[in-house]
Image (cartoon, rainbow, N blue to C red):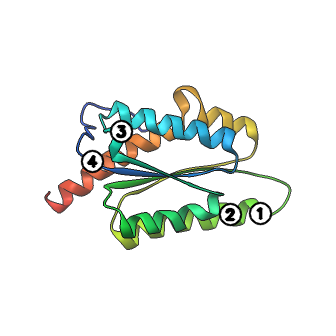
Amino acid sequence: MRRPVQKSKALEGKNLKFAIVVSRFNLEITGELLKGALRGLKECDVEEDHIRIVEVPGAFEIPQAAAQIAKWDRVNAIICLGAVIRGETPHFEYISAETSRGIMEVGLHFDLPVVFGLLTVNNLKQAIERSTGKNNKGRESAFAAVEMALLFKRIKGK
């Protein structure tokens, strides 16, 4: 069983800058993920003016926006938030796979932590469970972003 990323005292993000790319599609879910991510960054002492929020229409557009941020902004990490809920057509598989691949490619191409906060779920109930309360994957994504930003700084000797 996967252990969720949790806040530890070592996750100090005071001087770090973050971007959050969030999909407006399934807004009732992605809005909760965004609230969780902001709460997580605040718990890590990230300053509010060091957080840039970029909204995109849907999950498919997340990697495109993340790539532009990586290219033009000076951020320590990008958090990608969205929700793809399985339907009756193959659309779910295409969007989930391509968005996942795109998010990873941005991180590898730009040498930057790009955190996967995309819910890929079978139904609305699962999406609600993963976007609210203590299971909020947005909050977990924020902790992962701070941890990876600090790791990249250590690896680069900065």
Would you say the residues marked 4 and 3 are in contact, meaning their CB atoms lie under 8 Å apart?
no
Would you say the residues marked 1 and 2 are in contact, meaning their CB atoms lie under 8 Å apart?
yes
Residue 16: numbered disc: 4
Residue 95: numbered disc: 2
Q: Which residue is mark 3?
A: 48
Q: Which residue is mark 1?
A: 91
Discs 3/1, front: 3
Q: Amino acid at mark 2?
A: Ile
Q: Residue at x 59, y 30 (%)?
A: 132
Q: Is residue 121 above or below residue 114?
A: above
Quadrant in the picture for the C terminus: bottom left
Residue 13 visible: yes
Would you say the residues marked 3 and 1 are in contact, meaning their CB atoms lie under 8 Å apart?
no
> N-terminal of the two: label 2 or label 4?
4
Discs 1/4, front: 4
Q: Amino acid at mark 1?
A: His
- Where in the figure is residue 151, as x and y percent of width and height? 25, 52
